[in-house]
Amino acid sequence: MAGKPRGPHYTSAPSADTEAALYDPEQAKKEFARRLQDARTNLGMSQREIADAMSKLTRKSISQDAISRYENGQNFPRPHTLAALAKVLGIPKEALMPESAIQAINSEPPALNMRTAIGHPDRVFLQINQTMPLSIAARILAIIEEFRSRETVDRNGSGDNRSR
């Protein structure tokens, strides 16, 4: 049917690696990479064109290198990036990702999480899941260590017990 416009194309059928991808994160990355590359090439788009379209859609800079890392099975996109990628490709995100990979990405812990300790309204649990410069991480750890030292002194009522 020459001249007929191509509609959305859902990636090729799952490979033999799909079942293995349910259990192995590296296989899941490979399967995602294969599906992404299939979807992109079926649309006749370059990695640069995908990156540019995603940048316009998200109003955040997405590099061609990021798309390349996804297609080489080095990284998974974050949930909001996966949604934008699927939208640019005109396919549901499930068509790109093995189910286990979607669950893993959606369960990614937040960059910062703070919740009140049960029974201690003046205390919180703090979780940091964020890349940062080593100098900042060292400062945070120093603050935590200072807190622990003070808490030990308060609890024991005497001297500095850092050597424990």
Image (spheres, rainbow, N blue to C red):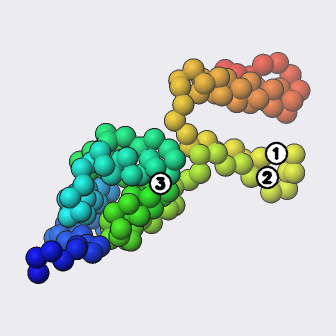
Q: How many marks?
A: 3
Q: Residue at x 82, y 45 (%)?
A: 123
The answer to whether residue 13 is left or right of residue 69 is left
Q: Dots 1 and 3: beta carbons under 8 Å? A: no
Asked whether the viewer can see residue 19, the reply is no
Q: Residue at x 27, y 75 (%)?
A: 7
- Tag 2: amino acid: Thr
Q: Dots 2 and 1: beta carbons under 8 Å? A: yes
For residue 116, the mark is 2
User: In the image, residue 23 lies at what x, y percent?
Assistant: 31, 65
| Residue position marked by numbered label 3 in the rendering | 57
The alpha-carbon separation of the residues under discs 2 and 1 comes to 6 Å
Q: Residue furthest left?
A: 2
Q: Dots 3 and 2: beta carbons under 8 Å? A: no
Q: Secondary structure at mark 3?
A: helix
For residue 123, the mark is 1
Asked which quadrant contains residue 25, the reply is: bottom left
Q: Secondary structure at mark 2?
A: strand
State which mark lies toward you, 1 or 3.
3
Asked whether the viewer can see residue 161, the reply is yes
- Tag 1: amino acid: Arg
